[in-house]
Image (spheres, rainbow, N blue to C red):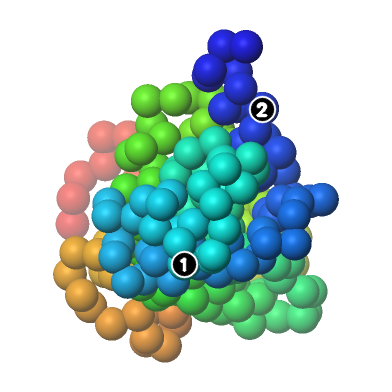
Amino acid sequence: MNETIRIVLLMALVFSSGSVAGGPRSVSKILDAARDVLSAQGYTALTIEAVAAAAGVGKSTIYRWWPSKEALVADALAEIFRAEEIPDLGDTHAELRRAVDMTIDNYANEDMAASLPALAAGLFPHPELMARFREAFLHRKRENIAAALHRGIRRGDLPDDLDTDLVQDIWAGTILYRRLMTGSPLDTDLAEHLVQLVTNRPPRLPHREAGAGIG
């Protein structure tokens, strides 16, 4: 079997449910060990050998379920990546605050923030694997946040033409940039400002007829 096809099929199994369904009893131990090694050594230095030693299993056990370091780390992080539904609270601001808080929680996690960019870079040369990565980490979370934004639109609290994808890009981009680059706090003030970027409509400039003078 072509190696790329084999990896895609295995990663489809790994990423399909956020955990390895039907796996050996040692799966949880392996995933815990992967996170422990990740915390201690960082993504670059993490090896399958180190994870196997920490979990007390053989390398062959890990390779039976995860075709690569990237697949193992992705599955280990997916287990702690928050992507729950935002409940209908009847309050758009409260719902969007939950969405922002969930995003902050994900990227405030040191292992998550440091590892995701490196993990994505490792998968980038393999479009099929990158697609599985996005499905595991992004799709469900983005769908759930988009549902909350659309409820706000239906209530009339948000503009009809709101770009829900762009809103999420701005939220996640701001949070991750602060976490990795500037070191600015990921606090309640930031959460409120990110929500208000959406809920506070900027003032519209008065319409001017074509050719009208200024003043």
Q: Residue furthest right?
A: 22
Name the residue that disc number 1 marks. Answer: 54
Label 2 crowd bin: few (<14), some (14–19), many (20+), radius 10 Å: some
**Above/below status of 86 relative to 131:** below
Image quadrant of residue 193? bottom left
> Given the image, on which type of amino acid does mark 2 rest?
Leu
Identify the residue at image location x=62%, y=57%: 141
Specify whether 37 is left or right of 213.
right
How many discs appear?
2
Find residue 135 and name its label: none
- Tell me if label 2 and label 1 are in contact, CB under 8 Å: no
Q: Which residue is mark 2?
A: 9
* Residue in the image at 61% along x and 47% along y: 61
Examine the image and state in which quarter residue 202 appears: bottom left
- Which quadrant of the rendered structure holds the C terminus? bottom left
Residue at 37% x, 51% y: name it. 47
Relative to 6, say whether 168 is above or below: below
Give the structural element (helix, strand or loop) at label 2: helix
Going by the image, does 119 lie left or right of 162? left
Seen from the viewer's position, the closer of residues 123 and 201 is 123
Three-letter code, disc 1: Ala
The spot of residue 83 in percent (x, y) is 64, 63
Locate the N terminus by quadrant. top right
Seen from this angle, which residue lies furthest top?
2
> Disc 1 on helix, strand or loop?
helix
Nearest the viewer among 6 and 127 is 6
x, y percentage for residue 10?
Answer: 65, 33
Q: Percent from the top left, x then y, of residue 80? A: 58, 68
Answer whether residue 66 is visible to the viewer in this image: no
Label 2 – label 1 distance at C-alpha: 27 Å
